[in-house]
Amino acid sequence: MTDLAGWGNYPKFATELLEPRLPGAVSKLMAERSGLIARGNGRAYGDAAIGQRFTVSSAALNRMHSFDPQTALLTVEAGVLLADILATFVPRGYFLKVVPGTKFVTVGGAIAADVHGKNHHRDGGFGDSLQSFQLLLPTGETVLCSRLENPEMFAATIGGMGLTGVILEATIQLRRIETGWLLQETKVAKDIDAAIAELESSQAATYSVAWIDCLARGGSLGRSLIYSAEHATRDDKENSRPDLEAFPPAGRVGLAVPGLFPSWALNRASVRAFNQLYFRRGASRAGTRSLVHWDSYFFPLDGIAGWNKIYGRKGFVQYQCVIPVRQARAVLTEILDRVSRRGSASFLTVLKLLGESNGVISFPLRGYTLAMDFPVTETLFGFLDQLDQLVAAAGGRLYLAKDARQSRATFEAGYPGLAVLKDLRRHTSGEQRFVSRLSARLGI
């Protein structure tokens, strides 16, 4: 047995880890076993990728099979990391259409969570860049799923958290780029109203995201830095920095966070100091456009090895919700006010505008998503339960890939497509075969 946790290091469970070396070996490992779930690189924050009894690792299923430069279609095994795709194809002038906040996610995990990025308002989630995938069903049969073949299974698997089967291989659409740089513009929002207004007005931008100072209060509640960006063209680079190479290599992982990092080091005072410095530094660049390396723009935390350890031995919870546009201003104001008054140490608070999603239980809906990190304490879960009530009352929901503690009632209120997924699982005999700690907790 192996003790496993998600990226938040909370909670931890014992599970038997199965490690197939080839896609064809997965069905053999599944035979006569139930209560299992697939696991990629362990970047789901909570308990979504921990099997109730068995956990099937896709780490060794990491081969790239084919690429067509004319159509930009790439076929890979489910365990291939987005980092490997980017390292291979950015120098060739291609980029993933959708990337989350870390590149150390597997393709299978990106499909299962329907990960989204800074461009969801325009380009949708990872599932929207999929052409097809091969799925191992509970029966042991492997089927091809696409928008034309097995479309119901295709839609249920995108954002389905691995509960429809094991993804073995996928074909995804890449985008062409002229350089490996982003042309970024920074704007300052004095409060949450201004931040929402700025994100609304930035919808024409391919990428946009707001960093929020979650400890600001009063008239500065929700003050933010808004970053919008486009892939830089050759002319953009030549006009700005002709000395730079067109396709810089991926950034290197820097210093690692010590394994025994003291949790007391991350407190209200230290976070406030960091936020002040970060805000002033960003504000000093407001109104200017500058070239930014693709790695640092999309994956700023990936440069710090093991940054999840910064919250100490007890771990942390990332709270990510989405609020429909109409209710967003009032609910986000209330949430940020409560967080600020509590003094919670979330040095990374991000706000993005999302569009609709196509997955049966995929997270995004047309609204604003707020993500915050909180160290695990005795009082945290009662506080988050109160935030859940605000989210549910507004017609919002929590992101399953980040969740470690929401109640079944909160989950069911936020995901109207749940009945469709349950029916499909019953029809394919998947209810007993594919069971994660998350699905058992939420009754999926």
Image: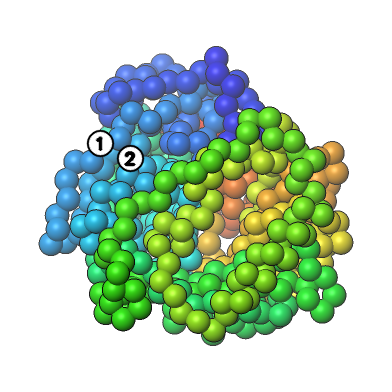
Left or right: where does residue 322 sit relative to residue 427?
right
Q: Residues within 10 Å of mark 1 (few under 14, many from 20)?
A: some
Instruction: Check disc 1 and report the residue beneath it.
Output: 63
Residue depicted at 59% across the width and 31% down the height: 5
Residue depicted at 23% across the width and 62% down the height: 93
Left or right: where does residue 47 sit relative to residue 317?
left
Q: Note whether 243 is above or below 392 in the view shown.
A: below
Residue depicted at 24% across the width and 56% down the height: 91
Q: Quadrant of the C terminus?
A: top right
Q: How many labels does the image show?
A: 2
Labelled disc at residue 80? 2
Q: Note whether 429 is above or below 207 in the view shown.
A: above
The residues tagged by marks 1 and 2 sit, at their Cα atoms, a distance apart of 6 Å
Q: Label 1 amino acid? A: Arg
Q: Do the residues labelled 1 and 2 touch (CB within 8 Å)?
A: yes
Q: Is mark 1 on a helix, strand or loop?
A: loop
Instruction: Return the x and y of residue 320 as percentages of the image width and height.
Output: 64, 55
Instruction: Return the x and y of residue 164 as percentages of the image width and height.
Output: 43, 40
